[in-house]
Image: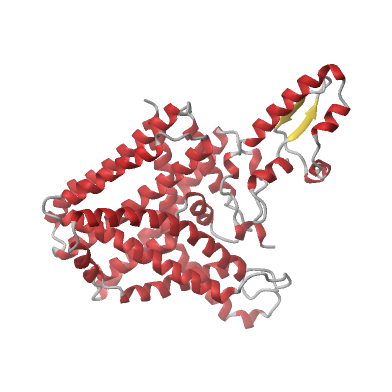
Amino acid sequence: MRIPKELEKLMFFGIFLCLDAFLYVFTLLPLRVFLAMFRFITLPCYGLRDRRLLQPAQVCDMLKGVILVICYFMMHYVDYSMMYHLIRGQSVIKLYIIYNMLEVADRLISSFGQDILDALYWTATEPKERKRAHIGVIPHFFMAVFYVFLHAILIMVQATTLNVAFNSHNKSLLTIMMSNNFVEIKGSVFKKFEKNNLFQMSNSDIKERFTNYVLLLIVCLRNMEQFSWNPDHFWVLFPDVCMVVASEIAVDIVKHAFITKFNDITADVYSEYRASLAFDLVSSRQKNAYTDYSDSVSRRMGFIPLPLAVLLIRVVTSSIKVQGVLAYVCVVLFYCGLISLKVLNSIVLLGKSCQYVKEAKMEEKLFNPVVTATPGKPAGKQQGTFKSSQGISTDENGSTSVTNQPVHQKENMPSLLVTSNSDQFLTTPDGEEKDISQDSSELKHRSAKKDLLEIDRFTICGNRID
């Protein structure tokens, strides 16, 4: 019975993290691109004192801005009305299958797209003296543009299918699509889950719920435009919107409740997940960060705001006509309101994140970061080899214990050598071999479980740029 409360706390915190990363594209990114362009134009006035024309963070901002503008103009060649009537002419069962395929494709393309963007940011900011083992910046840039454009079209088809379900007379398609959420329970409840797997599922649910909210916003904008912004029509859509949101919440609660019951996981694990997300937010607030902290949050949850932002800008600009001086003043005021919302949301999130990190006693890890995986080695092997955040001590009886005291990097150098079990037996009395074997097996069992902070923590831009 505690699961709904703890789960919704995690969802609430995670949705505001996604909202903060999403608002960044509309508010701070244009300002950062403008500052980067100003630095590039005024560079001859300062002279080439630095080795780089632009800082790595400015290069990433410029790339994001250029991708956003190019994909926005490419979306003008996609006719939303023709797509709507094409989808509306299909049968109910065919639309149901299309919607399921779109959900699967969205997850797969998101995973692939994050790697494309990471590769682009790395190749664009790579130090000049390093040997390049990749295809170059320009091919990666075109791949990133193609990915964002393709993902935006995919989300547009998904929003159009949902719009057709809203406008159907008998609401049968909408009912079938909402019942599709309960099929998700069948595919996940009866599987064995560890804490780390449940953490990844929770992040996926947060991203899915936030994306559905944006899709509902797009559907409402398109419908209100068709009815000349009549407020009475909004109250016609409101029950269907509530049904979609309620079904998502109910399915998530039932799914997580039975997963935790069948796998003997307590409800306190959601506070650990929330503290881990808060740790990502706090640890990425550094002066020498190469990309915005929203990138690390997006990578953790699998949420990529660029395609969704392209689609929302396309829908808003086609639905709302700006004419006259007063309209432009309203646009400027609306932009200032978005910036205020972004700043206020960031302040509240940072304060809450610091509170969650203190409650979880994870402050030490901020100054002693966990060793992350390299591209050539899986995270599991490195965890068994590198013990930078764990000190291993041996007591008088010869038993091995693990302590979480921070160790300096110089003191860790000898511990990089892997000690075999045979060495322990050679230096241990014969009467205590059984105890040592049991303790070593327990140590292996404990080290096999990954820390939550090591899941999906590999950030190319943050970890590999000098």
Q: Is residue 277 above or below residue 398?
A: below
Colour mapping:
secondary structure
In the depicted view, which residue is nearer to us: 446 or 34? 446
Q: Residue at x 57, y 52 (%)?
A: 285
| Residue 193: image location, x then y, percent | 48, 35
Measuring from the top left, give residue 396's x and y in whole percent: 84, 20
Which x, y percent locates residue 241? 22, 48
Task: Report the quarter where the C terminus lies.
Answer: bottom right
Residue 141 appears in the picture as rendered: yes
- Residue under the point 32% across and 40% down: 249
Q: Is residue 355 left or right of residue 248?
A: right
| Image quarter hosting the N terminus | top left
Is 5 in front, or is 452?
A: 452
Quarter of the image for residue 39 reads bottom right
Identified at 53% across, 48% down, the residue is 281
Image coordinates for residue 106, horizontal then vertical, percent: 39, 57
- Residue furthest to the top in view is 431
How many marks the image carries: the answer is 0
Query: Is residue 368 visible in the rendered structure shown here?
Result: no
Does residue 434 lie above or below 311 as drawn? above
